Image (cartoon, grey):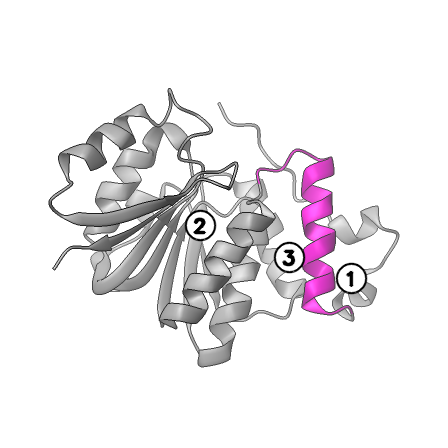
């Protein structure tokens, strides 16, 4: 069972009030959030993954993004910060209620209003009418990645992309995912960013 993440007010860790942290630039807040996550073993994305997400967000300018698994909202805030530039929106969620509450607080401190949070199993809380999504980021329970990917297929816009994090870090948990995409080679183009310790995979539909 995954360890629950308590909704710690990370700004207090740095002896700041909510308003003092909120006066920082988002770049500074993201740095504090990432450092706090590393010190408290919160499963945040790597800085390389941040760069990958920002690159594809700027390349695609997606209007609707789905994130599967938000932890304390570090990645959610990174994504929403980019989407704000062209009035895009993010739908995200998590199965840990404490994590989700922490993510909501962290979005507030970043003054981000284009995020919708949902609590529970993402497959049950996301509905067809929520989509289609132009970009889907999968970073949830690793042993269920193949299920999340199959679900994402049904929600993706025609020219959308799916980004999957940590595809090699947990080989046993990700085995069913890799077996699935090998069976689906005729449907997808993909490449891996191996320089990352996450081995991030990016998927687009074949014509």
The question of residue 34 being in magenta is answered with yes
Q: Quadrant of the C terminus?
A: bottom left
The question of residue 27 being in magenta is answered with yes
User: With respect to residue 147, does 28 lie above or below?
Assistant: below
User: With respect to residue 49, does 199 lie above or below?
Assistant: above
Q: CA distance from mark 2 to mark 1?
A: 23 Å
| Disc ID at residue 18 | 1
* Residue drawn at the location 54% of the way across and 54% of the way down: 50
In-front residue for pair 189/136: 189
* Label tally: 3
In-front residue for pair 52/83: 52
* Residue drawn at the location 78% of the way across and 61% of the way down: 18
The answer to whether 96 appears left or right of 155 in the picture is right
User: Are the residues at dot 2 and dot 1 in contact (C-beta closer than 8 Å)?
Assistant: no
Local crowd size for mark 2, using a 10 Å CA cut-off: few (<14), some (14–19), many (≥20): many
Give the extent of the magenta segment.
Answer: 24-43
* Residue drawn at the location 61% of the way across and 36% of the way down: 5
On the image, numbered disc 3 is attached to which residue?
A: 106
On the image, numbered disc 2 is attached to which residue?
A: 93
- Residue 119 visible to the viewer: yes
Where is residue 35? Give x, y as percent: 73, 46
Local crowd size for mark 3, using a 10 Å CA cut-off: few (<14), some (14–19), many (≥20): many
Q: Residue reaching furthest bottom?
A: 86
- Mark 3 or mark 2: whose residue is earlier in sequence: 2
Q: CA distance from mark 1 to mark 3?
A: 10 Å
Numbered disc 3: secondary structure = helix
Where is residue 138? Give x, y as percent: 38, 46
- Mark 2 or mark 1: whose residue is earlier in sequence: 1
């Amino acid at each position: 069972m995954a360890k629950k993440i308590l909704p710690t007010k990370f700004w207090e860790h740095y002896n700041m009030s909510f308003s003092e942290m909120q006066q920082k630039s988002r770049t500074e807040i993201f740095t504090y959030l990432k450092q706090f996550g590393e010190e408290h073993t919160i499963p945040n994305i790597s800085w390389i993954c941040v760069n990958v997400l920002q690159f594809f967000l700027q390349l695609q300018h997606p209007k609707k993004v789905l994130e599967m698994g938000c932890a304390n909202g570090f990645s959610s805030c990174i994504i929403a910060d980019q989407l704000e530039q062209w009035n895009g929106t993010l739908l995200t969620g998590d199965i840990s209620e404490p994590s989700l509450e922490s993510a909501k607080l962290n979005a507030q401190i970043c003054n981000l209003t284009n995020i919708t949070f949902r609590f529970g199993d993402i497959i049950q809380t996301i509905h067809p009418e929520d989509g289609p999504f132009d970009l889907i980021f999968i970073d949830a329970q690793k042993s269920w990645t193949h299920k999340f990917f199959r679900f994402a297929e049904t929600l993706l816009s025609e020219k959308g992309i799916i980004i999957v994090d940590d595809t090699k870090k947990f080989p046993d948990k990700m085995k069913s995912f890799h077996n699935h995409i090998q069976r689906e080679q005729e449907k997808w183009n993909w490449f891996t960013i191996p320089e990352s310790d996450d081995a991030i995979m990016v998927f687009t539909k074949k014509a």
